[in-house]
Each structure stands twice: as structure tokens, then as C-alpha cells.
Amino acid sequence: MSHGADQPRFLVASDNDLTCAPSVIHGTEGRWTFLIQGPASISINRAVLVDKGIEYPAVRIETPTPRSAMIDFEFSILNEGDDVDLMLYDGSNEPTQFKIRVVPGHKVKPSERQLGLVRVQLSPWTILYPLHGFRGEGRRVPHREVADLEGDSEFIGSVKAMGIETLRKIMSRYAEDDSMHWDDRFERYNHYRCTQLRSYIFHVDSLRSEAAYKELFLSLPKVEKAFVNEDRKKKPKK
């Protein structure tokens, strides 16, 4: 986990009912995305990340829903342990300010990642995912649409707020229960842990940092773990 014990998962600006996630930024990532939620998020027209007087203006602001904004930054290396200021402007005199903690960079470098996806382990039955079946359907169904899902409305709403439209269950033929399944190929039973069976791949914007999406997912109550996948084909040979 990247958060310190004293670092909240998300930040709240009570004066205008806005929340900011994640509460951290990876100092060596070079790009980052913040999710701002609340009724005033749609009014944000400018954002700046400030590090010791150096300003990094937002390179993109998108509003996936009427109550959310995804704000993207590009920056130089930030010092681990420092705080940087996220300043949000909506045309009023006073900006909304959040203090963001700088934490170490992710162990999987951007050049070695599977781009455009984040692997997430959810609490039991957070989403009711339609299974892909046992007779080849899984090969014909690459994913499910977030808009079609049922389950925990707060979690699904947060996924929509991030602009994520599709996902896939990692073991898409099996329900989430800890269980045994017969393998015809090897004529044996395989034991699948429930944690494996409630793991999902979320397809994210490949122009954004996968590490930022990982931290965004970790800010959600129904998320137990989140991972940036390594692409072993890209790993440098020793």
C-alpha cells in the first residue's frame, strides 16, 4: 500500500462538498490523474499542481458524469514525503485546495506495464457479474459494460465517475464462492480461492497512469486490493 498510516484515502473540502482522490501522488510517475466528485466538480475550468512554487497546469479536464471530473497533470520528479497543493478553480475568487502527499513511485515502471488496465480484488458480491459460460462464450465476450452491471450502487457510481466503461472478470466462468471445479483436460479438481474469483480487470484510459488508477481504486471502500500488471514481454532481459 502506498498510503501512510496517517494518510486518508481521499480528501474532503467541506465548504463546497467536493472530494478528491487519491490523496497521494507517486513522485517519479511523471503523470497523474485526480478524481474530483461533488456537485461543483462540473464547474472546474482550471487546475494547477503546485510544488514549492513551481506550477504544473492541468493538461486535461474531463467530466465523465455531471458530478465528477478527471483532472490530468504532467510533472517533473517530486520529492518523496513532501506535500504538493492541488488548486481547483471554477471562476470564483477563492480556489479549492487539497494537500497531496508525495509517495514513492510504483515498482512496475510505465515502460514495463500492461497498458490500459488495472487488476482489482473486490469485497464479496460488490458487483453481480454475468458469467461468460463454459462452452467457448468467454472467447466471444471480451468484457462486460459497466452501464449494464448491478451490485453496490456506490461502487458502480464511482467506476462511472472515473469514466471507465468496461471490465472483465479474471476467471469469468466461475462465481465468487471459494470452490472446487473439475478440469477435464487434466482429470482433476482445481481449488479456486474466493479472492481469485472476485478479481476483475478494469479497462482504463491508456493515456493516463495505471498507478493513478490503482490509487483511485484503493480509495473506494469495496476494494480490498489493486494491482498494476507487469507485461513480461516488455521486461528488460538481465
Image (cartoon, rainbow, N blue to C red):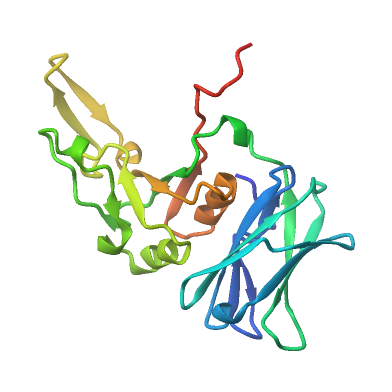
Report the number of discs.
0
Q: Quadrant of the C terminus?
A: top right
Looking at the picture, tell me which residue is in the foreground, 224 or 53: 53
Q: Position of residue 61 (x, y in %)?
A: 60, 67
Q: Residue at x 59, y 82 (%)?
A: 43
Judged left or right of residue 193, residue 185 is: left
Judged left or right of residue 216, residue 137 is: left
Q: Position of residue 8 (x, y in %)?
A: 63, 61
Which residue is the extreme one toward the right? 53
Residue 71 visible in the picture: yes
Query: Is the residue 62 above or below the residue 140 in the image?
Result: below
Judged left or right of residue 124, residue 15 is: right
Q: Position of residue 135 (x, y in %)?
A: 10, 33
Residue 108 visible in the picture: no
Query: Is the residue 154 above or below the residue 51 in the image?
Result: below
Q: Residue at x 48, y 59 (%)?
A: 220
Q: Position of residue 84 (x, y in %)?
A: 79, 60
Q: Quadrant of the N terminus?
A: top right
Q: Quadrant of residue 152?
A: bottom left
Looking at the picture, tell me which residue is in the foreground, 59 or 112: 59
Which residue is the extreme one toward the bottom? 92
Q: Residue at x 79, y 48 (%)?
A: 76
Looking at the picture, tell me which residue is in the foreground, 140 or 124: 140
